[in-house]
Image (tube, coloured by chain):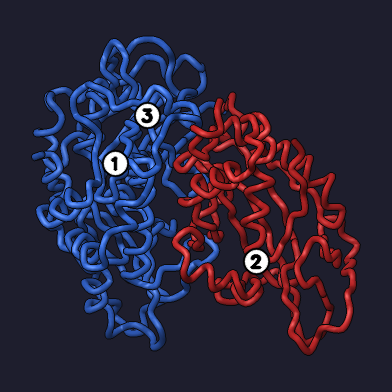
Amino acid sequence: MAAQKYVWEGAIPLQIHLHESQVTALPPPPPALILAPRIGYLPLLAPLIKPYFSSTLPPGVDTIWFDYNGLPLKWYIPTGVLFDLLCPEPERPWNITVHFRGYPGNVLIPCEGEDSVKWSFINSLKEAAYIMNGNCKNVMNMSQSDQLDLWNSIMNGNLEAYQRVSSKHKLSTVDDEYTSLWLPKSQQSLGETDLTAQVKTGRVPVRLYVLSVREDFHDLDEMPRVDSWEKISYINRPVEIRKEDKCFTLHDALKTLLPELFSDESLTNVKLTGVDFENATRNPNEDVRTDKVVEDQGQSAYKNPEGGHISGRAEIKLIRIQGIEPKLEIPFSWVANNLINPDYFLHICVYAKVGQ
Amino acid sequence: MDVLHWDGTLSAKDFRVGAFAFSQKWESLNSGFPPWVWVLSSKHPWLASPEEEGYLSLEKICISRPNEEDIDQISQIDTGEEEIGCPGNEDVIDDATLVQSSHHELHYCDFHIVYSSTFRVPVLYFRSYCSDGRPLPLDEIEKDLPACSSKELSKSKWTFITQEEHPYLKRPWFKLHPCGTAEWIKLLFLSDTAKPKFEVVLELYLLSWFSVVGQMFGLRTPFKISN
């Protein structure tokens, strides 16, 4: 599973500035340069960041939070996903601002350090387990020490340790062959299900983030910056892999999640006119090796179903998973097995242009 | 569709149907409470969504538990707004003595019933606040709950509260975790000796569900299952 290794090694270079309101001594401290794991979460970087700024902070209790261009960053979204979503044109290093006071409790769920992040992670894992197995018994039955080992493996970026614990508890992934694990009755709520058995329903946990813009753009850096989370639609819905004549592709999966943005016409490879993706597909400073994962790096064209135009109003501009723009005809089961986060969720960022 | 083989879950469409049935039954049974309102909310405001998405809302319900010294009378709190329902009706709230006292600030609760496509069951989201609108943290809210609830919360793996982003309002709300729901709801219906048809189950699903989760907040739902 070489692709998972690359996912785990992926990192975002951050340039972290202390917010001016927190600076008590001039000159203001220089920004901290930190390499943040894609699969990690921003508050976990606190021990690395604090030493840079502790001498200039005002006295009191610290509650860390971050913003990008004024937008408070949701700490429970993995760092790599935040970057893929909020930086259409990847910014290297990514300039974000850190705060230690003034936590925006009306926008962000409280975060009391590593424990909050761990708790949120375990909850996501339970949800993913439920989606894949029909119950979260395997996660609920994990011993304290196994839970800790799992969490530490993520904190340390240790994929082997992680796989040891996850396979022990049968945190399964989707069958990678095109054969389906789909139960004929699973579509209805009255499937024949033994609650105690581990039933693989063929459902894949997916979290979709759709950034919609009204004005068309030719370059990614022309996209208006995100100043509010209202501009992002978050869809937390599993995708069911169905066995059909042809194999179930990423395109098929996205179509079930965003039917309004796809048509019924078959997939055609179309170069989006005027959109410059050359910089987007090559990320030399990012550790994720896109060459291994996306077959053809020579093209700067973005493979897009023609059908985005069918509604006359809305079209998909970009789809990003783990910092790459995968071809839509890739089998979804491959994507589900190789590009997921440690929480067993597939986080997908979509840019869509919508009409008035 | 046989209840014996049912796994306790609902489709999104079932949920909408069940929600409508629930709000109708609720109105006919609880004159003391305001009605549940279906809030239509498209997740893609910029697209014409063929699917109606929404959730049930019941707001400004008084959940204060009075101190023992304050218990002397039952009184109705009337602020002139229709939405506020603080029924002193004993059928509806256990130990129903709602008292307006200067020592005891009243706490209110908003309840939203939202469908979870992950767990395929309804999920209760709630938030609690004072009369001046100040939101209450969880430890304050727990003081308002019946004593048995806090015990349940700490020991039962089926009922616990997390703070998460409301799926529609995008603000931090509290949520009663749904991962055991399908199991106990199925048991609830199977324990009824007259095994009902699925259509009946659907009609009664939310009412039965809320009769259990509502008790967490000291809200009792009186109802009869008609055959």
At 87% from the left and 53% from the top, the residue drawn is B31
Percent position of residue B199, x then y: 65, 29
Q: Assess disc 3: are there few (<14), some (14-19) or many (≥20) residues with their C-alpha within 10 Å of its C-alpha.
A: many
Question: Can you identify the residue that label 3 sits on?
Answer: A240
Q: Chain of mark 3?
A: A
Left or right: residue B97 compared with residue A314: right
Q: Are marks 2 and 3 in contact (CB under 8 Å)?
A: no
Image height check: is A55 above or below A120?
below
Crowding near the residue tagged with mark 2, few <14, some 14–19, many ≥20 C-alpha atoms within 10 Å: many
Instruction: Identify which residue, B227 or A324, lies in the foreground.
Output: B227
Judging from the image, what is the letter of the chain drawn in red?
A: B
Tell me if I can see residue A88 in this picture: no
> Where the C terminus of chain B falls, by quadrant?
top right
Q: Which residue is mark 2?
A: B128
Q: Tag 1: residue type? A: Glu
Chain A colour as displayed: blue
Q: Residue at x 39, y 75 (%)?
A: A63
- What amino acid does circle 2 point to? Ser
Q: Which mark is residue A89?
A: 1
- Specify whether disc 2 shares its chain with disc 3: no
Q: Is residue B71 left or right of residue B124?
A: right
Q: Nearer the viewer, residue B151 or B61?
A: B151
Quarter of the image where the N terminus of chain B is located: top right
